Every structure is written in structure tokens, then in C-alpha cells.
Image (spheres, grey):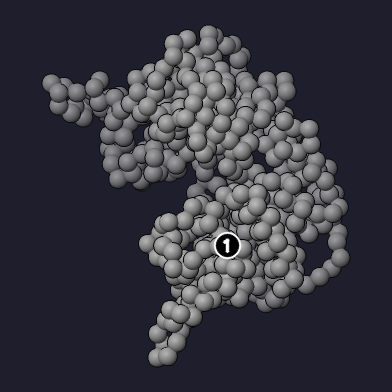
């Protein structure tokens, strides 16, 4: 399918908001490359693409968090610039994010009208008016919540509904919904669909971002597909199919990008059986072998990261067993996991993987201090030697080993995290989104080194939202959906289409 085939012609109309030729470059990464987007009054446009396709960057451009390096934004036919998020909000651009930005110490009403509170006499905030309007807005979203309730007392789903009410408190022209159903129950999702219908009747232009194809085909009027920071398709949702959208999302070659591997597997080193958590995942069972790269794929909310954190002892399961080298293992803390030879490279390297304002060598040596102490005292010389041994293998680019981590690029920070755990000489390494947000060169280095780890006999669990990475690197792939394993594929069965269809619950996928 070529580009012209994807851009279907639909009836002309005047868009409320249009973006043309938008580009945004970060160091080493071109997040958006000459992309376009049009949003129409009374219609829902679905923005579709893999993680890393450029969707989030586009939302930040729309809401004034980022300013584009190239291109033009037009609102009601007039060129506009959004230098700040307040400027975008004032112009009528409202966003409901997957991760709601609310304040636990404030009441529900205060959160809804934060920065936009109704005023009474003498310009003072009218608390009674604010509560009354908050109650009306909550009623519109079918949320049975007292406006006086402190936000901290609400669950995730209700906090999300408060965020929706907050968005409705502003007279918006454009409403952006970024994975709005990720934290909602089935009943709440149905209520959100009703609300979207009401917004359409009011003439709002809605940008709907979701990985769930059933949602997209149920509520969207139009679609736009991004891939690798470029627009690759768009048109009427009624003139396309799920298979065509999948093809547009993943239609890039993955061969010859990743290191060639022989895939010779050794003995079983890890067995997980009936592993469950009260809220995050259920009945997880799988095996992992020496020298194997086992891929885990899934969409937002699938439970992959939560599972890996539990295997590393960060959270406790409610049921299930772990066997390492055939022996049952009790892992109730990261310390116990490390002692058993399991290490975890987290997705959030800034908050969970490194101590940002400390030197590289102190980060890398931290879990291995017992091997670098001299007469029970810190030995910086030994720490630097250990650090250099592992960072050189990963081709870390730094001025010196005492350079602070927060002065490094994202890719080099990731290399510091991986070096830190390799220095403990583990048998099993869990890589959670190891190439997220890093440049192409650093990605290649991580891929090649991951292949080397497997070739040396280490067992690797690779959690990734990037389909080419899963297909190109994994010997087997496990797909999770809604906290459960829904499909396992061997190398021959592993295709981009099979992964997407299973993760999204399309067709005959399990």
C-alpha cells in the first residue's frame, strides 16, 4: 500500500484546527518530520501509531508545551502560535491526558476549577458557585463524587473523571483525549463514549489517541496514522479496515536492522507459574532459557512493567511461584532478586535507574560496593576501574567517569543503568523499554550489546512497545493484554501483524 493509497479523499470541510509541515527535533532524534493534522467540528479524529511514532510530541505541540521547529498551526483559518500551555488553553485547546495532572491535597471542586475559578463580589473566588458548577460538571460525566472530597481519597478511575470534568469547565474548541479509557472500567468507558457523543453535538473537534482498535472504529469519524515521526495515512474511518491500519502502523522493514543471532538456547533458568497480583496481572506462566531473548509486548495498561517489577521484588504477588535453575525462589525485595541473579533495568531511567546528580562511577558501582571496598572503606579507584570495564563495552560517551549522570544524553544514561547491573554479574537481566527515547546510534549499541549478552549465556527478558525491536531481537515473544498472557509466538510465527492483533484483541487473536 503506497502513501497515496492511504490518504483517502473525503468530503471537504473547514477544519477548526490544522497543522501543516510540523517538524520537531531533539538531540539525535527527529520526533516529527513534516507532519500534518486536521481536526473538524463535531467529529472525532483518531491519531494512530506505535509508541514512539510521534503522537505524544504532537499533543505537546498542540498544547503549547513544545514549539515546532518548522510548520504552521491554524485555528479557525488563522495562523496562531502557542508559546505556552496557557496560551493554548486560552485559545480553546483542552487535553485530557492518560496520566492526569491533579493535586491530591485540593478538593475535587478546586481541582476542576484550578486557575479558572468563578469569581464573586470584589473579585474573590466564589466557593459556593464553584461547588455548584463542579457538581453540574460531575453530573455530566456521570461521576457520583462530592465536590468537597479531597482528591487523595479517590481511586484512579474517579480521578480520571475529575480530569474530564476539569476539561469541560473550559469552553474548548478542541478536546484532546490521550488514552482516556486506560484507567476506566467497562461501565465508565461506556459513559465516556456517551460524553464524547455530547461533545460532538456541541461542535467540539476531538482528537482521540488510543491503541484499542475497537474504540477507534466505534467512535472515530476520521483517522491519521503516524510512523517514525511521519504521517503515513489519513482519511475517513469508514473507508479503511483494521488490517489496513495495522499495515500502516508497522509497514516498515525490520530485517537487516538488528544484529544476526544464532539463537542457541541452553538450559531453563527461570520458570514462573500461576503468578498473580491483586490488581495488575493474573495467572502468568512462562519459562526462560540460558542464552535466550524473550520479548514481552503489549499496549498501555497490559501489565508488563508491573509484572517485571514484581519479579524483581518491588511488589509482592498474591499467588504463584518462581523457580530459578529448578529451585523454588522466594523473592520479596530487589536485594533478594539481585542475590538470585536477577536484575531489572527500569523504563524510567531518570527516576528509577540512576541518581542523576552524582558521578557515573558512583552510579555504576553502587550495587557492587562489596567488591570495590578497601578495608571496609570506599575505594574510588576500584569503583572507576569497575565502571570503565562495563561502560567501555557499551561504548558510553562521557567526558570522564566522574561526570554527573544528568549531564549525559538519554542514550548514555541508559548505558550507565545497564552497566550498573551488568557489574553485578547476573544470570537474568530484565530490560524494560531499553531504547525508549534514545537516538538511533545508541539504540544500535544497546541492541548489539543485548545480543552479545545472550550469546555469552545470559538470559534476557526484553519488554518493548516497539514492534520491530521485539521481532528483530526476540527468540520468542509473549503478548500481554489486560494483565494476562494472551499469546506466545516462536520466531517463525512472530510478525508485526500478529503482535498488534493479539495486543489489541483484533480478529482471531487470543
Identify the residue at image location x=47%, y=15%: 323
Residue 334 falls left or right of residue 37: left
Q: Residue at x 36, y 46 (%)?
A: 407
Of the pair 140 and 79, the residue shown nearer to us: 140
Count of number-bearing discs: 1
Left or right of residue 349, residue 177 in this image: right
Q: Give coordinates of residue 80: x percent, y percent.
A: 61, 74
Residue drawn at x 54%, y 9% is: 266
In the image, residue 286 sits, relative to residue 506, either above or below, namely: above
Q: Residue furthest bottom?
A: 122
Q: Residue at x 63, y 47 (%)?
A: 53
Query: How many residues crowd around disc 1 within 10 Å: few (fewer than 14), some, or many (20 or more)?
Result: some
Q: Would residue 82 be visible to someone looking at this image? A: no
* Residue 6 can be seen in this image: yes
Q: Is residue 229 left or right of residue 350?
A: right
Q: Between 312 and 226, which is closer to the camera in this rendering?
A: 312
Quadrant containing the N terminus is top right
Query: Percent position (x, y) of residue 239?
Result: 86, 52
Residue 497 in the image: above or below residue 267: below
Residue reaching furthest to the left: 375
Question: Where's the C terminus, which quadrant?
Answer: top right
Nearer to the camera, 32 or 65:
65
Q: Quadrant of residue 492?
A: top right
What residue is shown with label 1? Answer: 143
Question: Residue 320's spot in the image, x, y percent?
Answer: 50, 23
Secondary structure under the numbered disc 1 in the rendered image? loop
**Residue 509, quarter of picture:** top right
* Picture coordinates of residue 171, whole percent (x, y): 61, 76
Amino acid at each position: 500500500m503506497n502513501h497515496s493509497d492511504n490518504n483517502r479523499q473525503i468530503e471537504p470541510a473547514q477544519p477548526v484546527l490544522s497543522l501543516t509541515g510540523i517538524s520537531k527535533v531533539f538531540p539525535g532524534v527527529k520526533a516529527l518530520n513534516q507532519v500534518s493534522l486536521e481536526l473538524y467540528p463535531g467529529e472525532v479524529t483518531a491519531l494512530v501509531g506505535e509508541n514512539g511514532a510521534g503522537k505524544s510530541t504532537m499533543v505537546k505541540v498542540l498544547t503549547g508545551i513544545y514549539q515546532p521547529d518548522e510548520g504552521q498551526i491554524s485555528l479557525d483559518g488563522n495562523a496562531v502560535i502557542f508559546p505556552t500551555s496557557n496560551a493554548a488553553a486560552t485559545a480553546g485547546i483542552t487535553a485530557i491526558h492518560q496520566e492526569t495532572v491533579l493535586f491530591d491535597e485540593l478538593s475535587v471542586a478546586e481541582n476542576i476549577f484550578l486557575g479558572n475559578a468563578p469569581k464573586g463580589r470584589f473579585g474573590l473566588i466564589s466557593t459556593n458557585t464553584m461547588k455548584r458548577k463542579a457538581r453540574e460538571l460531575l453530573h455530566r460525566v456521570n461521576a457520583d463524587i462530592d465536590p468537597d472530597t479531597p482528591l487523595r481519597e479517590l481511586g484512579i478511575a474517579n480521578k480520571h473523571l475529575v480530569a474530564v470534568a476539569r476539561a469541560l469547565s473550559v469552553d474548548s474548541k478542541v478536546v484532546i483525549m490521550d488514552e482516556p479509557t486506560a484507567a476506566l472500567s467497562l461501565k465508565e468507558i461506556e459513559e465516556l463514549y456517551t460524553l464524547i457523543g455530547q461533545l460532538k453535538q456541541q461542535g467540539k473537534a476531538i482528537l482521540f489517541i488510543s491503541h484499542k482498535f475497537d474504540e477507534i472504529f466505534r467512535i472515530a469519524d476520521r483517522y491519521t496514522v503516524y510512523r517514525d515521526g511521519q504521517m503515513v495515512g489519513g482519511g475517513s474511518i469508514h473507508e479503511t479496515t483494521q488490517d489496513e491500519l495495522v499495515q500502516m502502523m508497522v509497514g516498515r522493514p525490520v530485517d537487516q536492522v538488528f544484529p544476526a543471532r544464532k539463537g542457541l538456547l541452553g538450559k531453563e533458568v527461570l520458570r514462573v507459574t500461576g503468578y498473580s497480583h491483586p490488581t495488575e496481572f493474573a495467572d502468568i506462566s512462562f519459562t526462560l532459557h540460558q542464552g535466550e531473548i524473550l520479548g514481552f509486548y503489549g499496549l498501555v495498561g497490559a501489565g508488563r512493567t508491573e509484572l517485571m517489577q514484581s519479579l524483581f521484588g518491588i511488589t509482592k504477588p498474591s499467588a504463584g511461584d518462581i523457580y530459578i535453575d529448578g529451585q523454588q525462589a522466594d523473592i520479596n525485595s530487589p536485594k533478594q532478586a539481585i542475590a538470585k541473579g536477577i536484575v531489572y533495568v527500569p523504563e524510567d531511567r531518570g527516576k528509577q535507574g540512576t541518581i542523576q546528580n552524582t558521578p557515573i562511577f558512583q552510579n555504576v558501582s553502587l550495587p557492587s560496593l562489596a567488591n570495590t571496598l578497601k578495608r571496609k572503606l570506599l575505594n574510588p579507584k576500584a569503583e572507576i576501574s569497575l565502571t570503565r570495564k562495563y561502560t567501555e563495552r557499551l561504548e558510553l560517551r562521557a567526558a570522564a567517569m566522574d561526570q554527573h549522570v544528568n549531564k549525559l544524553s538519554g542514550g548514555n544514561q541508559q548505558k550507565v543503568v545497564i552497566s550498573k547491573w551488568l557489574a553485578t554479574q547476573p544470570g537474568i537481566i530484565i530490560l524494560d523499554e531499553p531504547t525508549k527515547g534514545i537516538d538511533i546510534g545508541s539504540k544500535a549499541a544497546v541492541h548489539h550489546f543485548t545480543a552479545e549478552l545472550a550469546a555469552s549465556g545470559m538470559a534476557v527478558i526484553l519488554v518493548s512497545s516497539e514492534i520491530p525491536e521485539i521481532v528483530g531481537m526476540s527468540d520468542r515473544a509473549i503478548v500481554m493484554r489486560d494483565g494476562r498472557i494472551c499469546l506466545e509466538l516462536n520466531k517463525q510465527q512472530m510478525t508485526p501483524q500478529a503482535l498488534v492483533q493479539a495486543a489489541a484483541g483484533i480478529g482471531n487473536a487470543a
